[in-house]
């Protein structure tokens, strides 16, 4: 999570309790709310699938975890090769490698984090370099056998243009289609 994000007071208790009650789960996350000026005035809510099978399905198209909400078992992350210098989306890269290594995922259907969002967030997710780096990551998912060819093509055709749109349009599209 970033320095200006806020965990809900019960977050760690909920996640630790979940991991203790579910020893087969290797990584647990949850929902988050985005805010611009006040955490009490959310502008969007990012919900993610909660059960492992739905998380695997989502991961074929986009990151199935809200990175700032994640808590995981260290050994599962190390087994998958840990974080790597994959810019952008080192978290998404790790999630896919963890899935390929047999890790079990879950998300708690509750807001665990309040994250600051805004224009800068959408700026970081655009431009030629971001588009090329993202395409390279998506191709690596295909080469590792995680996504079939038709999913790779779909992802490239839908995501690459989004990265090249002007920031304001990209932000509007995120708000309409990538948030609840």
Image (cartoon, rainbow, N blue to C red):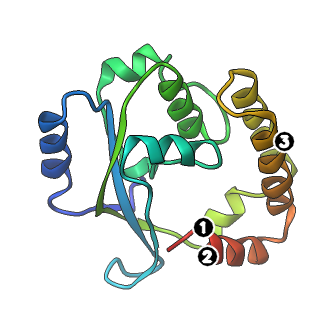
In the rendered image, which quarter is residue 79 located in?
top left
Looking at the image, residue 122 lies above or below residue 99: below
Say whether residue 33 is left or right of residue 56: left
Tag 1 or tag 3, which sits nearer the N-term? Answer: 3
Query: Dot 2, how many residues are within 10 Å of its Cα: few (below 14), some (14-19), or many (20+)?
Result: some
State the residue at coordinates (59%, 33%): 93
Residue ID for mark 1: 178
Name the one closer to the observer, 47 or 113.
Answer: 47
Rendering coords of residue 36 (x, y %):
48, 78
- Which residue is tagged 3? 132
Q: Residue at x 69, y 34 (%)?
A: 147
**Residue 160 image position (x, y, % from top left):** 83, 53
Residue visible at 78% across and 32% down in the picture: 139
Horizontal and vertical percent for residue 136? Answer: 79, 33
Image height of 77 relative to 128, above or below? above
Q: Please tell me which of labels 3 and 2 falls first in the chain.
A: 3
Badge 3 density bin: few <14, some 14–19, many ≥20, Cα 10 Å: some
The span from disc 2 to disc 1 (Cα, nearest Å) is 6 Å
Residue ID for mark 2: 175
Residue 98 or residue 150, whichever sits in front: 150
Separation (CA) of disc 3 from disc 2: 23 Å
Q: Which label sits in the foreground, 3 or 2?
A: 2
């Amino acid at each position: 999570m970033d320095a200006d994000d806020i965990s809900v007071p019960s977050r760690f208790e909920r996640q630790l309790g979940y991991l203790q009650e579910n020893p087969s789960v290797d990584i647990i996350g949850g929902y988050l709310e985005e805010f611009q000026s006040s955490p009490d005035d959310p502008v969007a809510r990012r919900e993610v699938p909660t059960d492992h099978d739905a998380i695997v399905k989502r991961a074929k198209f986009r990151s199935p975890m809200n990175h700032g909400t994640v808590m995981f078992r260290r050994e599962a992350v190390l087994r998958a090769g840990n974080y790597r210098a994959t810019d952008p989306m080192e978290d998404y890269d790790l999630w896919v490698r963890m899935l390929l290594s047999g890790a079990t995922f879950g998300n708690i259907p509750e807001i665990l984090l309040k994250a600051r969002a805004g224009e800068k967030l959408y700026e970081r997710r655009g431009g030629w370099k971001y588009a090329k780096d993202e395409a390279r990551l998506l191709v690596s998912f295909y080469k590792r056998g995680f996504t079939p060819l038709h999913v790779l093509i779909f992802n490239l055709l839908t995501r690459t243009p989004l990265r090249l749109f002007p920031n304001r349009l990209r932000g509007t599209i995120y708000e309409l289609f990538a948030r609840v």
